[in-house]
Amino acid sequence: MALEIYLDLFSQPCRSVYIFAKKNNIPFEFKKISLLEGQQYGEDFGKINMMRKAPAIRDGDFCLAESVAIMQYLAEKFQTPAHWYPSDLQQRARVNEYLSWQHMAIRMHGSKIFWLRLLIPKIMGVEVPQDKMDAALEDLNGSLKLVEDKFLQDRPFIAGEQVSLADLVAIVEIMQPVGSGLDVFESRPRLSAWRERVRVAVGTELFDEAHKDILAAQEMVKNLDASKMQVFKPKILKLFL
Amino acid sequence: MELYLDLHSQPCRSVYLLAKRTGIPFTFKPVDLSAGQQFGEDFGKVSVVRKVPAMKDGDFILTESVAILQYMVEKFPQLVPGHWYPSDLQRRALVNEFLSWQHTALRAHGSKVFWFRAVVTVVTGTAVPKEKMDSALEDLKQTMDLFQSKFLKDSSFIAGEEVSLADLVAIVEIMQPVGTGLDVFEGQPALSAWRERVKKVIGEELFDEAHQSIMNVDCLAKTFQDNGMLEFLKPRINKMFT
């Protein structure tokens, strides 16, 4: 059985896994999971990942969730070029440090902005209170500042001279608020330059293809049927409002 | 090697326990979170993120407990047995899967329950609204259930029959709400058995020593007050409600 990768390209961690697998010519079957349609709650997908989240892989009998773990697994199994997950002790530590930090920082803050700007107004039918929006933006700006000042500094990429899993995970998360119409790169020339380097390192065609859906999110959300998305209401109330 | 630690913090405990258990030589550099020392000038030179743990190995500074643990395993192969971070592809993947998942699950919910039960009332003078407390407890319960059904299943440890970084990180996070008097192990024989196995590998004495400060959180109230931290903590706590 071929390697199956369960993906929805609206999801940031799905994009990093997709880009990594395609860039490295890892053979896999793309199994589409539509998160906004709630397909992650289906019986079949539950057998792949009982946490009901994407991305997930099935490699023979072996199922694995969590994009960071998936990419570490694929890098090792398919012996991808060393720069993706360097073997040098300190360089690898730099990558691991970013991969750990990002969960409760840029991932959390970028996701929140996407929900607050696009999904919540659509599903709940109301705009998010300005003070909540401002607080979320402040958090995102704080995280972006750390990406620039701590993780990048004056290096071309997070781990040094070459692109790694850290840059890949970083870029897909930063593109999420961009998809909601917030151009975080506009006033950040250093970050923009880094984005272009990552885009070129990954392959501009692949990068753009992976981000096609998220960059069309504003239009897509407009056409969503809110009445079919009420299942997300309790989660929204709990997490964001 | 210098390790900047406050053992009230879960990720500090996992780093401390691995280093002590395996005999990695280090200097314990205390950072008193209850006195806001992470915001001081000295610590600022170590980490601009202003969080613990942090590691300084010569000129090399590293933050994030998961990264520090992985670094220590790699740097000291003669001290740290392979089972802590197995080289077998699938076993390592199981460890990595847990280490990734735990940030927004066990860690997030365990921390929140800790703050709600041990810190909030002390600082704000008012109880956490019942609805929010119940919600936080429910989240923790669901996360613990998932931990057992997906990560432990019927293995002795998360990655199989030997303890690893995953169990270490799991146990210190689970102990956080326990420190507030919430016995998450009660009525959970499988979970309790796992805890005993992990404690045994780490060493009971070392485990208890590392958890001493968190098991005495009644003192926190007075500590915050004595350190003049109440005004500083208030806006942070208000944010946790939003």
Image (cartoon, grey):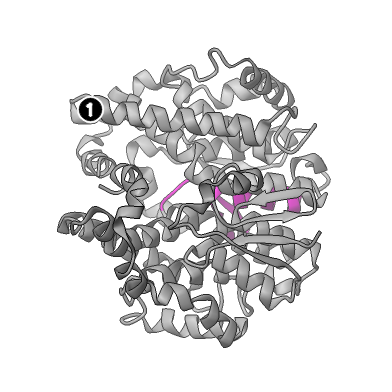
Judge by depth and name the residue closer to the eye, B225 or A30. A30
Task: Check the image and report above or below for B36 versus A165.
Answer: above
Dot 1: chain letter: B
Looking at the image, the residue that sits furthest to the top is B187
The span picked out in magenta is B50-76
Image quadrant assignment for residue A157: bottom right
Residue B198 inside the magenta-drawn segment: no
Q: Residue pushed farthest left?
A: A130
Tell me which corner region of the image, top left, top right, bottom left or bottom right, holds residue B31.
top left
Q: Quarter holding the N terminus of chain A?
A: bottom right
Q: Residue at image x 21%, y 60%?
A: A134
Q: x, y percentage for residue A2?
A: 78, 62
On the rendered structure, is B231 left or right of A74? left
Nearest to the observer: residue B127 or residue B67: B127
Q: Is residue B32 left or right of residue A44?
A: left
Name the residue: 24% across, 27% down: B128
Residue B123, horizontal then vertical, whole percent: 23, 30
Identify whether B25 is placed above or below A133.
above
Q: Position of residue A64 (x, y in %)?
A: 68, 50
Whether residue B109 is visible to the viewer of this picture, yes or no, is: yes
Q: Position of residue A199 (x, y in %)?
A: 54, 83
Q: Which residue is mark 1?
A: B129
Q: Secondary structure at mark 1?
A: loop
* Position of residue A24 in the picture relative to residue B104 (left or right): right
